[in-house]
Image (tube, rainbow, N blue to C red):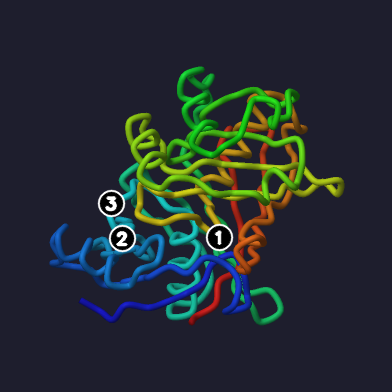
Amino acid sequence: MSDVLRYTAFSDDPAGGNPAGVVLDAAGLSDTEMLATAAEIGYSETAFLVARDGEDRSYDVRYFAPEAEVPFCGHATVASGVALAERLGTGPLVLHTPVGPVDVDTVDQDGRIWATLTSVDPQVVPADVTLVDDVLGALGWSRDDLDPRYPLSVANAGVWHLVLVTRTRERLAQLSYPFDRLRTIMADAGLTTLQLVWPDHFGTYQSRNPFPVGGVVEDPATGAAAAAFGAYLAHHGLVPPDASFTIEQGVDMGRPSLIHVKLSDDSPRVRVSGKAVAL
């Protein structure tokens, strides 16, 4: 196994973004060893890559949180893309994830490498009423805290997220929950994170993402949830079909992150972009 690299994604400041572990050569590692490595590192996810024989710039990848494997992780994908680009040069990459192949484009802009992932085909479906009520109860929120302009849905661009949009920034800032209770609710529903969002007055979305099913209280940047949220907005016609927007996450944790999301009017897939820097 190659060394474990450490990057923070969706920021070019080591004090911001979401840290991820990256193992560029995980050949021969068992599931138990990958999970143990992820737990030892302690980041919300670590990506384990294996180069595909005979395929240039193409890798198999798996993602492990400290307590479980995750089918897809956006910030660890961005971190992996930047790590590979620093060693191979910028250009296109293909990461074969458990949910399907994910194209990653890397470019150098003013001395910083950006990675852009293109999601798998997304899905958006109505949220189960009981699930919403159970989650709100665990968060200590009520239906009155939610913005009625945004339908209650679960969205998937690799993994499932419940999307809840608040009326106020103050409600989003007050995040506290019983860890085991919310983890059980989310695990039973097959959710990876909650996508808690407040649309600010500047066309940007403020977001927080509890991640108890992975053993993490909160993610400071969640690329998979950003892609799912883009699909959610497009599905409900809440933005133009070719919209671009940014998500600010991690602010309340003291690890500010900036996630760029781009929709396309000729494909349902969502593009998510960000920087990453070695720690």
Within-10-Å neighbours for mark 2: few <14, some 14–19, many 20+ = many
Q: Which residue is mark 2?
A: 66
Residue 187's mark? none
Q: Which comes sooner in the sequence, label 1 or label 3?
A: 3
Q: Which residue is mark 3?
A: 69
Residue 92 appears left or right of 142: left
**Residue located 56% across and 41% down the image:** 195
Q: Eyeballing the image, is 217 above or below 20?
A: above
Q: Which comes sooner in the sequence, label 2 or label 1?
A: 2
- Quadrant location of the N terminus in the rendered image: bottom left
Of all residues, the one furthest to the right in this rendering is 201
**Where in the figure is residue 153, as x and y percent of width and height?**
56, 25
**Where in the figure is residue 254, as x and y percent of width and height?**
63, 68
Task: Name the amino acid type tagged 1.
Answer: Pro
Q: Is residue 114 visible?
A: yes
**Residue located 67% across and 40% down the image:** 263
Residue 216 appears left or right of 218: left
Task: Name the amino acid type tagged 3.
Answer: Glu
Q: Which residue is mark 1?
A: 220
Within-10-Å neighbours for mark 3: few <14, some 14–19, many 20+ = some
